Image (cartoon, coloured by chain):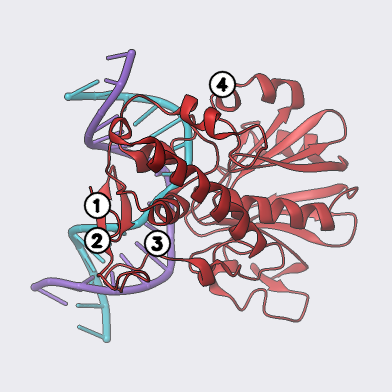
Chain colours: A red, B purple, C cyan
Amino acid sequence: MPELPEVETIVRDLKKKVLKRAFLDVWTDWLNMVKKPKKFEDFKKQIKGKKILNAWRRGKNILLDLSGGKTLLIHQKLTGHLLLGGWKQKRGQWESEIKGPLLDDPKNRFLHLIFWLDSGKQLALSDLRKFAKVELWDKGDLKESKEFKSLGPEPLEKSFTFEKFKKVLPKKGKIKQILMDQAVIAGIGNIYSDEILWRAKVHPFKDVSNLGKEELKKIYQAMKEVLPKAIKLGGESFSDFRRLSGEKGYFDKERKVYRREGEKCYLCQTIVKRIKLAGRSAHFCPKCQKP
DNA sequence: CGATTCCCCTGATAGC
DNA sequence: TGCTATCAGGGGAATC
């Protein structure tokens, strides 16, 4: 499940591998993947020949600035991830041209969108659930777009101080839900909200109006600590996420509660609980994180 | 207007 | 064995 650290990992990989490359062609077997422009033929026409000038991230969005003033937006949603490799089509099946484990991994096999680059490589989007979205924007329009303007601040920016954090928080609401709200802070999802709250020793259901300054400070510090650590480790390793090379990240070393239901808390040995919250799972230690 | 539900998808798993 | 029901989950739209 790509969140800020996973998207940042992919963007850094892209910066190393595809800058200054041009798109020769693009293929899909899932017309709904590209949402803008609506007709895939139009998308293909507009993307052909464009050069990748820059790669950046905003929240959980991957952005590629292209020649001609366009920006390609890719949101991986739950199970999408970009892969760089070489493939060819044989009897309707995609087969790897390169040796290696890239396509041996079942999570890498759901290729629904493939860009041919002038480097001789293919940039492919694998997405089991088909929730990912791809959009081609005029750069200016994107910055003015409703979706972009409604995104909250980037938690890792230096300007995101503790004062700013307190200021953007709503007056009420469950803290986990608030941390995952992209309009409040951009980039945090289910994994990292659980991990942040465990480190801060705050119950995920606790209302923000009942949080003291010390608790808020701990949440802020945990956020500033966990996210960079996860980036350093190349993202999570237990879900569908893979980096550009097809490899997993190593966040498992640091994972404390997410998907650890029924296992022991690393601090107090209490059994980690999972509770549903607005259709999402919240994992927490009932002893360390009191309501 | 804020909060909740639905919907987009399909592999994995449980139940019969 | 094989079928069907349930679930996961980001985010936007529809609905309460």
Label for residue A262?
none
Q: How many angstroms separate mark 1 from mark 2 (CA)? A: 6 Å
- Along the viewing direction, whichever of A248 and A41 lies nearer the viewer: A248
Chain of the residue that carries numbered disc 2 in the rendered image: A
Marked residue nearer the N-terminal end (2 or 4): 4
Circle 1 SS class: loop
Question: Separation of disc 2 and disc 3 at Cα?
Answer: 16 Å
Measuring from the top left, give residue A51's x and y in whole percent: 88, 42
Q: Which residue is mark 4?
A: A146
Q: Are marks 1 and 2 on the same chain?
A: yes
Nearer the viewer's eye, disc 1 or disc 4?
Answer: 1
Is residue A140 or residue A68 the one in the foreground?
A140
Q: Residue A53 in the image: x percent, y percent?
A: 86, 41
The residue identified by callout 3 is A258
Give the left or right position of residue A133, taking residue A17 as reference. Answer: left
At a point 86% along the width and 40% down the height, the residue shown is: A50
The answer to whether dots 4 and 3 both sit on one chain is: yes
Q: Disc 1 vs disc 2: Cβ atoms closer than 8 Å?
A: yes
Mark on residue A290? Answer: 1
Residues under labels 1 and 4: Cα distance?
A: 38 Å
Is B9 on the left or on the right of A72, as rendered?
Answer: left
Crowd around label 3: few <14 · some 14–19 · many ≥20 (10 Å):
many
The answer to whether marks 2 and 3 mark residues whose Cβ atoms lie closer than 8 Å is no
